[in-house]
Image: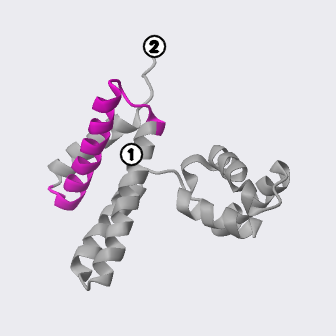
């Protein structure tokens, strides 16, 4: 029996796009098209196929952009636009790894600070490098930075 190759994140996005088109789910269709286009642009710049981790990085960046838009729209009183962006965040978040809870992240940051031997805010770079290795895409970099800064203060 012939083994199937593993399903890549890119192919999963394409399959879900096809399903959204078939189901006439316009929001999901448009959101997936934007995400696929963003990944395609990165792929063209790299000149090769993207790995799943690289596609995850693109999706994470897309989610971050939308969260910033939500804040801007909310501040401007454009609640309908903010709700649309929030719906897009929820669609894209389904493709991202499960985010850790605040307590789990704080514990990991404290553990990392102890292991690295960090004692002052000057050691933030060393701690952040190790936190990024351990957490990868399970935490937004800005959130990790805030937690490390608090732990070193």
User: Could you tell me residue 72's position as x and y percent?
Assistant: 32, 75
On screen, residue 40 versus residue 119, left or right, reads left
Q: Mark 2 points at which residue?
A: 1
x 20%, y 53%: residue: 29
Q: Do the residues labelled 1 and 2 touch (CB within 8 Å)?
A: no
Residue 4 in the image: above or below residue 146: above
At 36% from the left and 26% from the top, the residue drawn is: 49
Q: Residue furthest bottom?
A: 77
The residue that label 1 is drawn on is: 58
Q: Nearer the viewer, mark 1 or mark 2?
A: 1
In the rendered structure, the answer to whether residue 48 lies left or right of residue 130 reads left
Give the residue at x 57% y 53%: 138
Mark 1 or 2, nearer chain start = 2
Image coords of residue 79 (percent x, y): 26, 82
Q: What element carries label 1?
A: helix
**Residue at position x 39%, y 31% from top?**
50
Residue 79 seen in the figure = yes
Percent from the top left, x then y, of residue 95?
Answer: 42, 50
* Most common secondary structure along the magenta stretch: helix
How many circles with numbers are drawn on the protein? Answer: 2
Left or right, 55 with reference to 141: left
Q: How crowded is mark 1: few (under 14 residues within 10 Å), some or many (20 or more)?
A: some
x, y (%) of residue 4? Answer: 42, 22
Magenta span? 24-53
- Is residue 86 visible in the rendered image? The answer is no
- Distance between mark 1 and mark 2 Cα atoms: 35 Å
Give SS at disc 2: loop
Quarter in which the C terminus is drawn? bottom right
């Amino acid at each position: 029996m012939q083994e199937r190759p593993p399903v890549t994140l890119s192919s999963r996005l394409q399959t879900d796009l096809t399903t959204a088109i078939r189901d006439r789910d316009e929001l999901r269709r448009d959101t997936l098209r934007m995400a696929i286009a963003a990944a395609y642009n990165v792929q063209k710049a790299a000149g090769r196929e993207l790995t799943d981790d690289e596609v995850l990085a693109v999706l994470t960046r897309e989610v971050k952009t939308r969260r910033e838009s939500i804040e801007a729209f909310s501040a401007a009183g454009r609640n309908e636009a903010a709700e649309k962006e929030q719906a897009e965040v929820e669609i894209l978040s389904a493709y991202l790894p499960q985010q850790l809870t605040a307590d789990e992240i704080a514990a990991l940051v404290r553990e990392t600070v102890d292991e690295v031997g960090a004692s002052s805010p000057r050691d933030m770079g060393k701690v952040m490098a190790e936190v990024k290795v351990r957490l990868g895409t399970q935490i937004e970099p800005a959130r990790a930075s805030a937690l490390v800064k608090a732990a070193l203060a």
